[in-house]
Image (cartoon, rainbow, N blue to C red):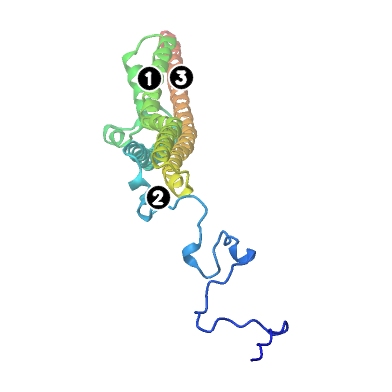
Amino acid sequence: MPSAAPPSADAPASAPADGPTSTDAPFSDEARAPAPLGGTPGDAANDVVVGPAAVPGEALPHDLSPWGMFMAADIVVKAVMGGLAFASVVTFTILLAKGVEIAFAKRRARRGIRRLVEADTLAEAIGEAGRASRWGGPVALLARSAEDERRRSAGLSADGIKERVAIALQRVEAGAGRSITRGTGLLATIGSTAPFVGLFGTVWGIMNSFIGISQANTTNLAVVAPGIAEALLATAIGLVAAIPAVVIYNVFARSISGYRTLLSDGSALVMQHLSRQLDRARTEVVASPRATGHVAQQAAE
């Protein structure tokens, strides 16, 4: 029986007929390499997010308007902002009230000065009882004070009368000056202290922001920025209260200085009238004996 021929070297090796086909093919070096950091393209489950921890949505402020920041601020910062807002309201209230008062006072003073200029004597400027009651204001008070002192000092030396009248006029001017400056000192106080009060609110708010950063264990800007913005809002309100107060105070200072100048002019006119009347009275007293002696001489002749 002939023996089987040996298999040819060129023939491919046949796989076992009854064995299952293996699916575990050996891996190459490339297949065994680790996947990239981002994972395979399209595999979202393997993506890695690198960066700061996400902040919960409810921890972020939703309203960064001035009113929203005020409502979210600390109670101390709220008190500072409320006080500065009230100071700003007081400033503009003084602007309206004192502005009207100074305008009317200047107008009345100019009318009084015009009346003194047109009159020949203090009695003529003051007028009769009914007319005198309608003339008001500091200039009218200057004229009445001088006339009253002249009547009380009748028969006394002219120099003494002038000295006492000058003292009375100074008192009237000082009283009018105190009255017209009432309330302006509050403007100076607001203008000088409001920036520092706002700065106190800012320091307090920033301190609370740093405390919140340490408690949240994060430096995310979304967590840090709202507290700092609330703190800076206090400084902004302080400047809003201080700057108008300083400007208004300077305007009133110039207006009051002009008003005092008008009062000084009124005092000068009153002193001119008084001096003229005293000199006229002295001249009449000196001329009266001469006239009497001349008449007696003519009668004797």
Q: Residue at x 46, y 17 (%)?
A: 279
The kind of residue on which mark 3 rests is Ser
Q: Earlier in the sequence, mark 3 or mark 1?
A: 1
Q: Earlier in the sequence, mark 3 or mark 2?
A: 2
Label 3 crowd bin: few (<14), some (14–19), many (20+), radius 10 Å: some
- Residue 120, by quadrant, is top left
- CB atoms at circles 3 and 2 under 8 Å apart? no
Q: Earlier in the sequence, mark 1 or mark 2?
A: 2
- State the residue position of label 1: 171
Q: Residue at x 33, y 47 (%)?
A: 71
The kind of residue on which mark 1 rests is Arg
Quarter holding the C terminus is top left
Closer to us: 285 or 119: 119
Quarter holding the N terminus is bottom right
Closer to us: 86 or 282: 86
Seen as rendered, the residue at the extreme front is 1
- CB atoms at circles 1 and 2 under 8 Å apart? no
Is residue 226 shown above or below 297?
below
Q: Secondary structure at mark 2?
A: helix
Residue 220 in view: yes
Residue 243 pos. (x, y %): 48, 39
Residue 119 in view: no
The kind of residue on which mark 2 rests is Pro
Q: CA distance from mark 3 to mark 2?
A: 66 Å
Q: CA distance from mark 1 to mark 2?
A: 51 Å
Seen as rendered, the residue at the extreme left is 130
Residue 199 pos. (x, y %): 45, 34
Label annotation for residue 66: 2
- State the residue position of label 3: 275
Q: Residue at x 58, y 61 (%)?
A: 36
Is residue 155 shown above or below 21?
above
Q: CA distance from mark 3 to mark 1?
A: 19 Å
